[in-house]
């Protein structure tokens, strides 16, 4: 089954409005639409209404970097998935390793966020991945398995089609050290097999699995050519128009 390719730019806590505007303009004018390709940008939340305006009638979609497991109420500082949906977001990330580390988000909290995002009408991109210590101790597969299982235990099976997974080895994020295409493919295949056990072959084949961690123009094509890599989640290289355009061109 042909899966869509998603190229996602996670801007993290970067870019002022003028910088973001210029970047979106460059992408809008230079990214070539291709069948089966979706390009999504993840700005800081206050920029989302601007993105709605700037990306109108372009191939670019946008989403949020995180959101609450609640839609409304007494949760000061949190971000409602329902509001994000109303502001035109198509996606939201859940469980990025920086959120898991900085805000001690557990697998269960991440799964609850994904559930709330999907029930609010967003597609949830759930990030999973191991630390270097876990890989060296050969615990990485157990860690990833627990992270993936938590999501599917929380989300209604009828909505599993709204889940996108992103494998992001923590040792490769922002370090310049990318997993080799073979290393990444091995884990993607492991996740795909796990999905088959949980959901059956059809859903497993339909679920996009993205790779993230030091993706750049120079390595994107090789990563994207792997059978089970259905897109990339890009941090640092998504802040520079030229570099991000090269990644988009790599598909
Ligand atoms: P990086 O970040 O591309 O800067 O390594 C990826 C991510 O954190 O999603």
Image (cartoon, rainbow, N blue to C red):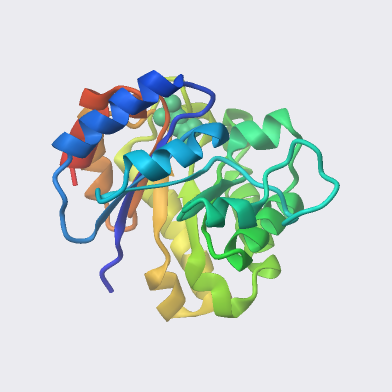
- Residue 1: where, in percent of width, then height? 28, 74
- The answer to which quarter of the image holds residue 183 is top left
- Residue 188: where, in percent of width, then height? 42, 54
- In-image side of 208 versus 23 (left or right): right
Q: Is residue 41 visible?
A: no
Query: How many numbered dots are placed on residues in this image?
Result: 0
For ligand 1, give the image quadrant.
Answer: top left
Compared with 201, 11 (above or below) is above
- In-image side of 113 versus 86 (left or right): right
Residue located at (33% from left, 36% from top): 180
Residue located at (73% from left, 54% from top): 69
Q: Nearer the viewer, residue 79 or 185?
A: 79
- Residue 112: where, in percent of width, then height? 72, 58
Residue located at (22% from left, 29% from top): 26
Q: Is residue 235 visible?
A: yes
Q: Residue furthest right?
A: 74
- The answer to which quarter of the image holds residue 215 is top left
Q: Nearer the viewer, residue 36 or 73?
A: 73
Compared with 32, 26 (above or below) is above
- Residue 63: where, in percent of width, then height? 48, 46
- In-image side of 32 versus 205 (left or right): left
Residue located at (15% from left, 54% from top): 34
């Amino acid at each position: 089954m042909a899966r869509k390719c998603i190229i996602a730019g996670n801007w993290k806590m970067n870019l002022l409005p003028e910088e973001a505007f210029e970047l979106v303009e460059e992408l809008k004018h230079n990214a070539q639409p291709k069948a089966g390709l979706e390009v999504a940008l993840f700005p800081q939340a206050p920029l989302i209404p601007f993105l709605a305006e700037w990306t109108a009638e372009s191939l670019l979609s946008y989403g949020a970097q995180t959101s609450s497991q609640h839609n409304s109420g007494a949760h000061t500082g949190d971000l409602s998935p329902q509001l994000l949906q109303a502001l035109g977001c198509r996606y939201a990330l859940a469980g990025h390793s920086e959120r898991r580390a900085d805000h001690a988000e557990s697998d269960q909290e991440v799964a609850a966020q994904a559930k709330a995002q999907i029930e609010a009408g967003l597609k949830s991109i759930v990030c999973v991945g191991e630390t270097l210590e876990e890989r060296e101790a050969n615990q990485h597969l157990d860690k990833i398995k627990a992270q993936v299982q938590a999501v599917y235990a929380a989300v209604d099976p009828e909505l599993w089609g709204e889940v996108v997974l992103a494998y992001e080895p923590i040792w490769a994020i922002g370090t310049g050290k990318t997993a080799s295409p073979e290393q990444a493919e091995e884990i993607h295949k492991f996740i795909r097999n796990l999905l088959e056990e949980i959901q059956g072959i059809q859903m497993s084949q339909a679920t996009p699995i993205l790779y993230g961690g030091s993706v750049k123009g120079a390595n994107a094509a090789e990563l994207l050519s792997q059978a089970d890599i259905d897109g990339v989640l890009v941090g640092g290289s998504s802040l520079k128009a030229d570099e991000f355009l090269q990644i988009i061109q790599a598909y």
